[in-house]
Amino acid sequence: MSGVVAAAIVAHVPTMGVAEKTPEFQKTLVEAEKTIGRLLRERLRPDLWVIASAHWVATFDWLVTAQPLHEGHCVADEAPNLIPGIAYRYRGDPTFADTLVAELAAAGVPSVANTSSRYEWDYGTWVPLSHLDPAAEVPVVGLPTVLMSDHAECLKAGEAVHAAAKKLGRRAVFLASTAMSHVLVRGRHLLPTPERVAADRRFVEALEAGAIDATIAGFGEYSNFTGAEMGGRTLATFLGVARSIARERGALAGHRYGDYGQSSGSYNAVVAVADPPTMARLN
């Protein structure tokens, strides 16, 4: 089986990057990412992580990291006291990146290969991968959140990820690095409003039930109500990937790993979807 074999929402809260800075109520997210990363690597043996980050922001084009090697130091620009410059080194996949650029263009989505040798990862990319794949076993291709894109374009972009992986015979895992509710307040321990918490839980429960089409149909309303991170664009890209898997393999199933975790009024969860036989291997 090739293409995207599983898709997951993962958390990137900057306090998750260094263990001694992680509060108790966020440790569930760290442990969840460690668990799902081990299961994905050992049981699915993916050829590639494709990660879309809510903290790599592009304005016009879908930039696709095409470097053969990702190496540098991650600094959280908004919180260098939390992530001051931590070294990383992961392989890339230029062939996949070029194929994805072509698939995006074919879908009418403007895209450019990011070949800069000086480009360094944002913390939305580094934090989850540091837990999912701490030994850097699996190559990585990164995607940004594009400000000029709407949800419809993000859905197309997600579908292009699956198409590119199918074309090359790659077994890819797609990662959406994003929060759900994201109406921020000062106070790391604070939850979203009870109404937003309830909406986020319903969203995750729908993914666990594999209700992808219904989730997409109501996504605009959900995203607006919860103030979803980056206008819900990263989540919409995830839904595009999930819809592609479902169209090829039938009804999906999902599973949440660990508990929900808050951060300054945002809500975070680690949840994966795949076809039911694949999900059974991840439980």
Image (cartoon, rainbow, N blue to C red):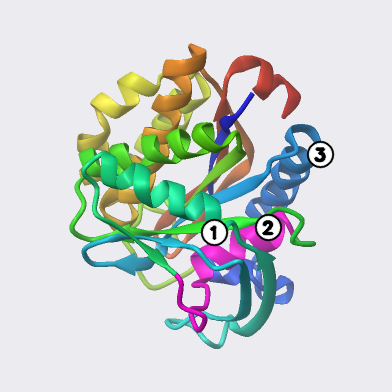
Give me the C-alpha separation between circle 1 and circle 3: 24 Å
* x and y percentages locating residue 134 in the rendered image: 76, 61
Q: Which mark is residue 78?
A: none
* x and y percentages locating residue 70 in the rendered image: 61, 71
The residue positioned 50% from the left and 84% from the top of the image is: 118
Q: Residues within 10 Å of mark 1 (few under 14, many from 20)?
A: many
Q: Quadrant of residue 273?
A: top right
The residue positioned 68% from the left and 58% from the top of the image is: 27
Amino acid carrying label 3: it is Glu
The residue positioned 61% from the left and 58% from the top of the image is: 128
| Circle 1 SS class | helix
In contact (CB < 8 Å): disc 3 and disc 2: no
Amino acid carrying label 2: it is Lys
Q: Is residue 152 shown to the viewer in this render? A: yes
Q: According to the image, label 2 marks what residue?
A: 27
Q: According to the image, label 1 marks what residue?
A: 94
Which of the image's four quarters has the N terminus?
A: top right
